Image (cartoon, rainbow, N blue to C red):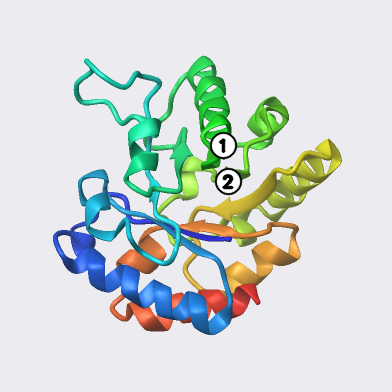
Amino acid sequence: MFVINCKNYEEISGDKIIKFVKTAERISKKYKVKIAISPPQHLIGLVSNSSIPILAQHIDDSKVGSTTGFIIPELLKKSKVKGSLINHSEHRISPKEIEKLVLKLKELKMISILCVKNVAEVKKYVNLNPDYIAIEPPELIGSGKAVSKEKPELIAKAASIVNDSKNKTKLLCGAGIVSGEDVAKAVELGSEGILVASGIIKAKNWNKVISEFAKALV
């Protein structure tokens, strides 16, 4: 699984998100790699009919109906969104909310990608059985220093915990990934995919860098 979090970067603003998603679609098909994209929330409607999974960056534990300003999983599903990131380092939520939202996405048969900052949180949340746990040390996010190189033992330990749980959860590796070499190292250490952001979004040639990462995964 190759997840690209677009965050709220200007490089992806307006209809540029359409070009970005089309680039990812072509590469996904060419290399037979599952690529999913999390656009800024207000741009989801422009790309929700994509042939690759579109994910929300965040969801709320709130209800359909008379609520304002919340991102409701049930309504995302009706808009063809396939799932969501939960508890990203830049949008942390409480353990109680995490549990409710993982269960909610499971009920809705949507993809859950639970973001954690360390091995202790992997242990804490693996039994919720999210589809993916993405481990991202906050200090390395956007740093250009890949966790697979800076803290390889972190990925190896997290992979061991996830595998020992015998759940269907798979491990993703994130933070500071900027090259195919970083991706290959993450896979070697036991990750079954990657969660990336600035390393791709801020690249001058999207086709080149997405292709490089996809080839490293296969």
Closer to the N terminus: mark 1 or mark 2?
1
Q: Is residue 125 left or right of residue 210?
A: right
Tell me if residue 175 comes above or below residue 59 in the rendering: below
Q: Is residue 146 left or right of residue 148?
A: left
Residue that label 1 marks: 116
Q: Nearer the viewer, residue 189 or 44?
A: 44
Q: Is residue 208 left or right of residue 79?
A: right
Q: Could you tell me the amino acid type at mark 1?
A: Val
Residue 28 in picture, x, y percent from top left = 49, 75
Residue 203 in picture, x, y percent from top left = 32, 73
Cα gap from disc 1 to disc 2, whole angstroms: 6 Å
Displayed quadrant of residue 120: top right
Q: Nearer the viewer, residue 207 or 18?
A: 18
User: Dots 1 and 2: beta carbons under 8 Å?
Assistant: yes
- In the rendered image, the residue lying farthest to the front is 78
Residue 51 in picture, x, y percent from top left = 42, 67
Tell me if residue 178 comes above or below residue 117 in the rendering: below
Q: Could you tell me the amino acid type at mark 2?
A: Ala
